[in-house]
Amino acid sequence: MRYAVRIAYKGTSFSGWQSQKNAYTVQEAIEKVMALRYRQHIPITGCCRTDKGVHAFDSVFHFDNDENIIENFTYSLNKMLPTDIVLKNIKIVSTDFHARFDAISRSYIYRIHTFKNPFKQDLSFYYPLILKADFDKMQEVANLLLDYNEFSPFCKTNTDVKTMKCSLKGCRWINNENGNFEFHIKSDRFLRGMVRMIVGACINAGLEKISIKEIRNSMNKQIRLKTDWSVPAHGLYLNNVKYLTLD
């Protein structure tokens, strides 16, 4: 049988989602407790690869097992997992379900705060300078990106993806008017580092470090910006992953 599990995690203590040599990851933490609980190695497949320090309000992984292990699955494993990870629910799915390839959309939120707050350390980007940025220009960049379906300028180098095509379904800034800002973006897929580089471009445009014209030219020619910026990982959250066959 194949199972799909929805989870959430605080990424501060992890080197991202995917298992790596000499690095502690979310995938490794989950597979270790599953091996202890069921006395066998059960490989899991995640819906995407979040970077070191990135968080998830909602993420999904799948795995196969011959036994019906739904009963007490989340309860027993949550007792064993570190407090940074919570398994929310488990569901039996079709044997051809794939957590990564069957997702029809993913959404992210990037959080910025402008007043020093020890309770937001590692959970939001402290950047008071955004108060000097032109918010309308930041939103203009977000609106501009909705006109494109290729995003080479916003992909980290040395990536192994075969296509730069992404279908954005939403891209907007929110000013909460209390010193907190949020950037929301939704797409069928994302490139490596894409959201953090888009956030950086929006802020740079708002601060007039780059122009809207430069960004448009970069997108038209699919070339990197001369001044690009990948904002820190700890402000980024995987917010929601949607499927046709999974609630």
Image (cartoon, rainbow, N blue to C red):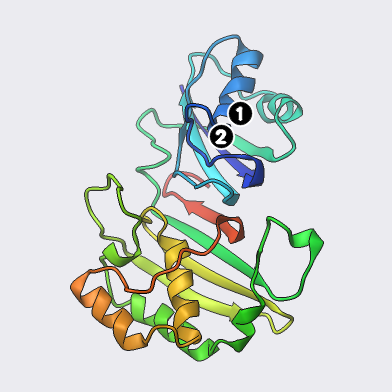
Residue 47, percent from left and from top: 45, 42
- Residue 89 against residue 44 in the figure, above or below: below
* Relative horizontal placement of residue 107, taking residue 162 as reference (left or right): right
**Contact, CB < 8 Å: mark 1 with mark 2?**
yes
Q: Residue at x 48, y 70 (%)?
A: 199
The picture quadrant where one finds residue 82 is: top right
Q: Which residue is mark 1?
A: 29
Between 10 and 204, which is closer to the camera in this rendering? Answer: 204
Amino acid on which the number 2 mark rests in the picture? Thr
Please tell me whether mark 2 sits on a helix, a strand or a loop.
loop
* Residue marked by disc 2: 25
Say few, some or many: other residues with alpha carbon within 10 Å of mark 2 (under 14 / 14 to 19 / 20 or more).
Answer: many
Looking at the picture, how far across and down is residue 236, in whole percent?
56, 59
Residue type marked 1:
Ala
- Please identify the quarter of the rendering in which residue 182 is found: bottom right
**Left or right of 51 in this view: 84:** right
Question: Is residue 171 shown above or below 56?
Answer: below
Where residue 92 sits: x, y (%)? 51, 30
